[in-house]
Structure formats: structure tokens, C-alpha cells
Amino acid sequence: MAYNWKRQASVAYGCAQARLALNFFLFYEEMPETYEEENGSQKELDGLFMELLGRFLSGESEELLEAAGELRKQVQQEMLQVMAYSDGLQIYEYVLNRMERRFQKCLPLETDETGVAANLMRYIAAPKDAAVQNQRIQMIVGQLPVRFTKQKYFGMVHDALTSYIGSDPAGLEDMMYLLRSGSMVSLAGMKQKSYKKLDRIFAEFQKLSFKEMDKSAYENARSQAEEAGNMVTALISYCTNLQEMVNDLYILCLTRESAVRDAGEEKKAAKIIKGLWQLYCQGNREIPEELEDCLPNLEGIQEAYYEKYQQTDFSRKDGRDGTEEEREDTRRGEMVDRLMSSSTFAVLETGKTSGSVSREDVEAAADLFFSELGPVLSSCQKPVARAIMATTLSYLPVCFNSPEEIRDYIQGSLSCCTDQFEKEACMELLVQIMESDGYGLL
């Protein structure tokens, strides 16, 4: 079947229109009346979205594409900043989790380190799928106590990165992003931090003396970690919801000129979207009952269009074929595909990378990462440095060459940990992982 841009545009437009109306209503309900310093860039981002929405409602489409694309990038940058806070928080939670048995009464473990190590080896070997085995190894590495030098750690990271030699450069780029974020390099390198309360909490974490911590300080740190976790969860939800609305607005701009539109459905959605936009312009956050009563009119519309989109084959010719107009339709169709996908922050137009990762690429990436991570490790206490090492090692491709190497690593990690509370906490977490996966301990 020949590619039909008009058919794709019509289905995508109907879906995005209904979805934007529903999501905008939910988003508006949560929008603050006043923006505090803890809201970061939300006031600016909300304002930019409302400005674009107003222009769309006034009839603009093509003219908005560049501005909508820029807003998508801004929201993505905000999300990257929030994720840096989230990953940093996980490091401190990692440390606090391993101190729990020092201050709280916990049930005694039913197995010792030898038994845990044996069960872990059986747990790794149980699935026949090598990919599942590797996932289990990575998960275990992320929980085991770390007791080796910085140079040993750098060597392990370097060796694991060499597995990317000969592969697509995008894979190495993704891994370096994970390593930077999971090691707090991204957080330390932030040029501008927008969330003052989170910054204050992290500053308090940095001042903690984990070695001399008493129960009161521990409980206070736990409380702060919980507060920060709630904030980060809310911020992630905010960025995701805003990006989803920007995506739908982008789809509407891409497709409005080509879509066959249902006048009745468009009127129902427009009443909600325009009504909320007008409230925002008036500074009114109270949604009238009249708009609430419009919601049932949109029930099932988004789902029906999305199901149709998923079931329809929008096969298209290679973008290099056909007329200039056909190539443009193909390009737009590919962008709509990405915007309609489950990947909220998908890049719309990806440049094709040529070649593959060389050893020189790996060396350069590793050297840069080590130069960024060195100051972070030097500035933090040992428990935090160990948490960073364990977390980042769990992201890397498995670099063990045999089951014996895995067993030695597990046994060595447990036996080298002289902090009994930390060792027991690690073993308890590992046992919980196995049990939650349905593995019966022997």
C-alpha cells in the first residue's frame, strides 16, 4: 500500500487533540497559583507552553514548529537536571540503607555469607537466557559491598567500556551519560541549579559524618531523603506531563493543514483547551463546573484513535525517493511516529552516525569520565564513594570471563567488608532480590 500522509495526519491529529484536552485539564488542576523558588523553571516553562498554545488557538501551525521544538529541548534539559538530582539521591539512599541495622532492630539473617554467595551463583545460573543472566549479575554487583582502590575501579570501568569497540557510537554515548549521572558527575557539573530546597538537602548530606553518625542524625537524614524523594518524584511527573502536552501540540502543528478533522470532536476538545487557556491568562486557577462537565464528551476518543494508529500500516517509501513534497511528507510522518511513541523524550530528527566505536574513542571517553569523576570521589566520604562505584559498575556490560570470576568477586566483596552492619544489610537486600524474583533459597 502506498504511503498516505493525509491518512496518518488525520488519525494522529484526532488522537493528539483529545489527549491534549484531557492532559491539559489534569495539568491545570495541579498548576500552582504562585511559583515558589522550589518550582525551579516551572513558571518559565509553563509560560512558554501557554504562549505557544495561545498562538495555536489563534490559527498558527507551521509557524510554531521551530518554537515547539525549542520548548521540547528545554523541557528535556529540565528533566535531565531533575534526573541528576534523582540519581544523586539514590547514592545517599544506598549509603543510608546499609546503615539501617546499626540504628534499627532488624530480624536476624537466616543464612551466612557463604550461603548467600552459593545461592547467588545458583540464582545467576538458573535462567538459560544469557541476557537475563547478565542482568542478574549487574543487579548483584550493584548491591555488593565495594572494597577496592580507585585505580582498581577505574580499571574495571575501562575494561567494561572496551566491549563497545566496533559498535554503534550511540551505545557508548548512552553509557557515558548513565555513568556521569549515576556517579553524581552530572549533578556536580550543573552550571545552574534551580531547585533551592533540593540543593540545601544535598548540602546537608555532604556535611554528614557517616562514621560518627548517631541515631538522631541518621533518622534526620532519612527524613530528608524521603522529602527529597517526594520532591524529585513530583518533578519527574511534572516534566513528563508537560513534555507529553508539548508533543501533542507539536503533532497538531505538524498535521493540522493535512488532516481530515471531525468538526464535532474538535469543538469538544477546543472548548476545554481554550477555556483553560483563558483562565490562565486571567490568572484564575479555579476550573468552573462548566469545563468539568465537558470531560465525559471526550471519553474513548483518544483510545480509539490511538488503537487505530497502532493497527494501521503507514508504510512509506525511502525518503530519498519521490518528489520533494513526498519526501517532506515522509519526514513529517517519521516525526509523528516518534511523537506518538511511548518514548516521551524521543529525539525527533536523528542524524545518522557513520562508522563504529574505535579503541581511541573508548580511551577518550574513559579518560574524560575519570577526569570528571576524580574530584567527585576525592570530595566525598568513603561510604559515598563506594556507593558511586557499586552503582556505576552495575550499569556496565558484564566483564567477567567465567563463573569462577563471578564467584570470586561475590565472595571477595562479602569477606572484605569489615562493617558487619553493612554486610548484613547487603546480604539482606540480595536475599530480597532473589526472593522477589521467585527464587527459592537453598
Image (cartoon, rainbow, N blue to C red):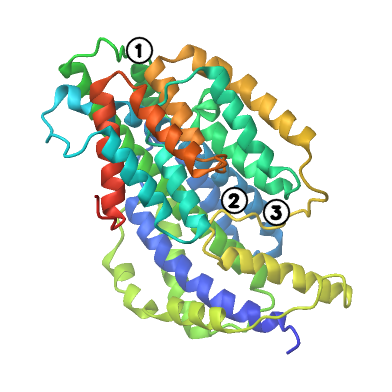
Q: Which residue is mark 1?
A: 207
Task: Give the mark nearest the N terminus, 1 or 2.
Answer: 2
39 relative position to 185: left or right: left
Residue 262 quadrant: bottom right
Nearer the viewer's eye, disc 3 or disc 2?
2
Amino acid type of the residue tagged 3 in the rendering: Glu
Q: Residue at x 32, y 14 (%)?
A: 208
Q: Nearer the viewer, residue 74 or 82?
A: 82
Please, what secondary structure does the residue beneath circle 2 have? helix
Task: Give the mark nearest the N terminus, 1 or 3.
Answer: 3
Amino acid type of the residue tagged 2 in the rendering: Arg
Q: Which residue is mark 3?
A: 66
Nearer the viewer's eye, disc 1 or disc 2?
1
Alpha carbons under labels 1 and 2: distance apart: 36 Å
Q: Nearer the viewer, residue 383 or 68?
A: 383
Query: Can you say which quadrant of the picture contains the N terminus?
Result: bottom right
Q: Position of residue 253 (x, y in %)?
A: 64, 66
Furthest residue to the front?
404
Contact flag, marks 1 and 2 (Cβ < 8 Å): no
Q: Is residue 73 visible?
A: yes
Q: Residue at x 55, y 29 (%)?
A: 186
Q: Position of residue 411 (x, y in %)?
A: 38, 32
Q: Which residue is mark 2?
A: 72
Quick one: label 3, few (<14), some, or many (20+) residues within 10 Å? few
Q: Nearer the viewer, residue 159 or 280?
A: 159
Q: Residue at x 55, y 52 (%)?
A: 51
